[in-house]
Image (cartoon, rainbow, N blue to C red):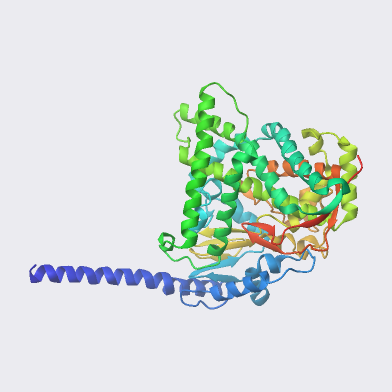
Amino acid sequence: MDNFTCSLALSSAIVALVYVTSKFLTWIWIRPKKLEIFLRQQGFHGNSYKLFHGDSADIKGATREAMSKPINFSNDIFPRASPVYHKAVQKYGEKCFVWFGPRPAVVISDPELFREIMSKNYVFQKPHSLPVKRLIARGLVSLEADKWSKHRKLINPAFHVDKLKHLVPSFYLSCGEMLSKWDEIMGNEGCGEVDVWPHLHTMTSDVISRTAFGSSYEEGRKISHLQSEQAMCSVGADRSVNIPGYRFLPTKVNMKVKQNRKEIESLVLGIINKRMKATESGEDHHDLLGLLLQSNSKEMKQGNEFGMSINEVIEECKIFYFAGHETTATLLVWTMILLSNHDDWQGRARDEVLQAFGRGKPDYKQLNNLKIVTMILHEVLRLYPPAAMLSRCIQKEITVGEKVRLPAGVELMFPVIMLHQDPRIWGDDAKEFKPERFGDGVSKAGAREEQAAYFPFGWGPRICIGQNFAMLEAKMAIAMILQRYSFRLSPSYSHAPRVVITLQPEHGARLILTKLER
């Protein structure tokens, strides 16, 4: 190699090194400091940026402290469920930000700004989730722009109100199996202590197996278990700095997540293949998978670009499994916990159920006419929303509201619990369980109707597609439980709400169940 070639190679190496160093310094220091200056000029406050780590030490400390012990029974759960944002708001006020490594997250607690941002889904998109979280599922909830619109169009028919009424028998069957297990636990005594959380979790997973895939819980149990493991793996990732390339390292968590993903996809693909063969042989299925495949096939036959690949169908099925049962399970467990602490509302709900259909099988129309049960479910969703925090990101500098300017590169965090329990909107009793707020419907629930802040299923075009499914299933389950049991908190119950993707009771839900005379 001559001197010229050596010099050229050395110069190229130096240029490449300078470029990489420049990009690294911009990512790790220059850009975060520019964002910090911009945010402070807009009146936002937070800790000064710390090289690479940001607020990671404070985040870990706040989380460790909050999770160290249960709390007294109270609906003031924001400090424990979202300790990082609670401490930031306490220290710096509502216009604050938190550092996740070199990335600042701005807290948005104004419901009007929330509605504006959520309504512009093409402008304010979901943040790119961490690689570990993307392995849970990459379906509708993680897609953006035209890709999201395509999938939403294909999936919508499966969640149409007219289709949901056909799922009521599956709700009834799954809930009936759970109650039969409780009967066995009660035995001849007719009374006993049960941790209802795992039973509700199993029941809602069973519902998804039947309504989404037409299979029994036994066939879907493995998928449900693996998806729950994936969720637990993602919790630690949420609280750590996202190091580029870290997902490729053979760590215990990374290997577990990848192994689970392969197994889940293999199981789901098996179900899909069996269904497609059955459809080809003339069988007609009205479950969610069948409706999705029908919708997709129709688009493909018309030559449209909206058809989904088999891998995309798999991802949507994974979302069915995770979101479909986690959301309803958490709604049901907090409903039972709160009704255990409010005998008056439990009695009123039971009276309504028995008056509507006695000890018989509830039907679709009767379930939708349960006003008191519906009020209770909405109040539970207000106090204990399944998604305690929603987020969006900004691709370019933009002004929201009348004068709030936000720079590209920041993440927007919406503390749903904080919005749902804001006394300025809901009144001085905002943290109290008062279902009568929803006596005249959701739109008139707040103390100040013009600033209603009720977002348990999100808002705008991306509002949860399965909200009607979840509410109908919850009504069926609560109605059937009230028909057969009264329940109260066990002395061993520990009140410890925590976020594992959804808002869950960390130590379960130990209740005293008493079988009612038939």
Residue in front for this viewpoint, 478 or 375: 478
Q: Is residue 220 above or below residue 117?
A: above
Q: Position of residue 442 (x, y in %)?
A: 77, 49
Residue 447 can be seen in this image: yes
Residue most extreme to the top: 282
Q: Residue at x 70, y 35 (%)?
A: 170
Q: Quadrant of the N terminus?
A: bottom left
Q: Quadrant of the C terminus?
A: top right
Q: Position of residue 325 (x, y in %)?
A: 65, 46
Q: How many marks?
A: 0
Q: Residue at x 14, y 71 (%)?
A: 7
Q: Position of residue 161 (x, y in %)?
A: 69, 35
Q: Is residue 288 above or below residue 493?
A: above
Residue most extreme to the front: 188
Residue 41 can be seen in this image: no
Q: Is residue 176 above or below residue 39?
A: above
Q: Position of residue 328 (x, y in %)?
A: 69, 48
Q: Residue at x 70, y 61 (%)?
A: 417
Dividing the picture into quadrants, the one containing residue 116 is: bottom right
Residue in front for this viewpoint, 266 or 95: 266
Residue in front for this viewpoint, 187 or 491: 187
Left of 170 or right of it: where is 319? Answer: left
